[in-house]
Image: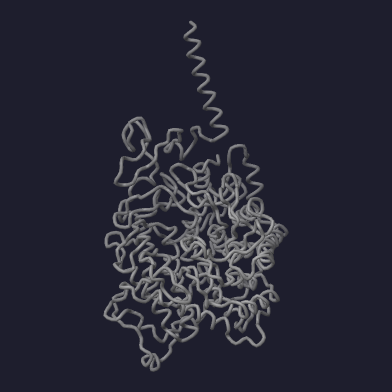
Amino acid sequence: MQWRAFVLGLVLLRLGLHGVLWIVFGLGPSMGFYQRFPLSFGFQRLRGPDGPESPASGPAGRPGTPGGPSGPSWLQPQVPGAAAGRRRAPRRPGPDVCGPGHWGYVLGGRGRGRDEYEKRYSGAFPPQLRAQMRDLARGMFVFGYDNYMAHAFPEDELNPIHCRGRGPDRGDPSNLNINDVLGNYSLTLVDALDTLAIMGNSSEFQKAVKLVINTVSFDKDSTVQVFEATIRVLGSLLSAHRIITDSKQPFGDMTIKDYDNELLHMAHDLAVRLLPAFENTRTGIPYPRVNLKTGVPPDSNNETCTAGAGSLLVEFGILSRLLGDSTFEWVARRAVKALWNLRSNDTGLLGNVVNIQTGHWVGKQSGLGAGLDSFYEYLLKSYILFGEKEDLEMFNAVYKSIQNYLRRGREACNEGEGDPPLYVNVNMSSGQLMNTWIDSLQAFFPGLQVLIGDVEDAICLHAFYYAIWKRYGALPERYNWQLQAPDVLFYPLRPELVESTYLLYQATKNPFYLHVGMDILQSLEKYTKVKCGYATLHHVIDKSKEDRMESFFLSETCKYLYLLFDEENPVHKSGTRYMFTTEGHIVSVDAHLRESPWKEFFSEEGGRDPVGKSGHRPRPHELKVINSSSNCNRVPDERRYSLPLKSVYMRQIDQMVGLI
């Protein structure tokens, strides 16, 4: 009798322990997703495609084996061609989809009743609250900018905790995390110029431009990354120049007295100093770094990432077309085509690291994040700006490959059986899963999908990243979707989620995205604000900080937050079509940038371009006799969709990151 009581006691103790774990940690069984993907303390890690089997998910020990449910469909290999017809026109919702009951259900969670979420997320975002959030976003920028000017200028960055400046690490040239970005050219000031204009601060914009003209020089013994110098510095100089010389002056009077195109001349000077990166490479793919005084360092690395080498076309193309000099666009376009020609014949995918001399892929991971992200982005944005058909053809081809091999989960975004869609990292040649993490840079992709009208998919993917933000109050640099935990824990104030939130709001006008922006804004204020600015989160869980405020915080994060809440901004009301570079610099889309007298000569001599036309580099005498003609194809009208976040999908996403 005693042993029965003892056994019964053990059973009750175990049940009680499970109940506590369920309540405190959300580790008990639950509906939907977890029925197919149970968690346990003894979670086994997934091995690589050539390693041991994937973790068991049932008593039989193998996914799909009778006796236990399979793992999530994200772990399963994609069937080639299965997603070929996946892209379709986004559907408009029925009249009752966005009613109060819908929003009450969307983000429901443990301990939160339906009424609470309905009250928080349904209905319009009050104008007073919107103005308050806009002013908070502006105040965030001003606090960071003013402290940079007071404590760090003319150095490149602000150390916001100790209230002092930061420049290149001269003592440790191998410190690429710092030296790739900081060139001893007042980076934060330069990067923030167009944000000042967008916020309507004409006096500070004019003051900042004069400071840049009078104090910034690129004749420095600084070895910088070509990509970072291009998107942060070259792009900002070109954007500010266009703002100053815009005859319409939509942001207020941003003109500079006696301005003589100094910013354009500075951009030209910088670009010339970057050109040696494109010389002496067998493939035409540039070296990753140059010294601004001496050119490519003797010990330069022959390996570069696809995004770094293939995301220069927007800035170099704008410069070429403003100057009437094809050189810069030609070298950038040659690099894009060289990378494109190295894509896999089987999958159409590209790797993330390539040897610029041999053309061999050193890194064969294909994904949406670091190493590849802006390559995709600039294929589309180059077409939008310049109207070159081959850019759109390349983008459409790679987007199809992404859908076929990277996109996992159910076919329909918001309906059907299976796991919600997710884009994973795969081997470029085989399409096989390489790991089970995503990185925070991938949060840009919903915004890119908005630009091509794939709004419904963008809504679903954005919801995944926002659910992670809700859990940590930030996006960890890497998040392991199998283990449901961060792999890399820091958050350097990145803008990608904010950017996608802003673009999705512009596409849908759904007030949900204003609530998302408010969540992000309040998290930044709560967790990252320090004595003299906003600091990188070293650890998204314990919220410890690093003493660094990267320049993109002012040029992108604050800008997108401000624009999200400033409905009356000239960006939205002026009638001018604008596009943002990968660093968030604003560029007007107009006929002048689509005029290219050297268009037919862009392909390499003796080679073939992506659409099969042979060509060669233009010679100066040839350019003189070519008649300029406008290629101003009409940019498609902005399409707005009032698409909802489907409640079933959001509930599954919330479950996945442990919010329920």
Task: Please tell me in which quadrant of the rendered image residue 25 appears.
Answer: top right
Q: In the rendered image, is residue 590 in sight? A: yes
Residue in the foreground of this view, choosing between 9 and 237: 237
Expressed as whole percent of the image width and height from the top left, the position of residue 581 reads 51, 70
In this figure, what is the number of numbered marks? 0
Q: Is residue 626 above or below residue 76?
A: below
Q: In the rendered view, does 609 fall on the left or right side of 197? A: left
Residue 589: % across, % down: 52, 77
Q: Nearer the viewer, residue 159 or 415?
A: 159
Tell me what residue is drawn at x 31 percent, y 56 percent. Answer: 81
**Position above or below: 343 against 629:** above
Identify the image's colour scheme: rainbow, by chain, secondary structure or one colour: one colour
Left of 14 or right of it: where is 100?
Answer: right
Is 583 placed above or below 258 here? above
Residue at the far top in the pictured view: 1
The residue sitting at 59% across, 56% down in the picture is: 513
Q: With 354 as the anchor, is 527 left or right in this view?
A: right
Residue 628, image x, y percentages: 43, 89
**Quadrant showing the C terminus:** top right
Q: Quadrant of residue 250?
A: bottom right
Q: Residue furthest right?
A: 128
**On the picture, is 278 further left or further right than 487?**
left
Q: Position of residue 635 (x, y in %)?
A: 48, 75
Residue 566 in view: no
| Quadrant in the rendering for residue 254 | bottom right
Residue that appears at 47% across and 77% down: 293
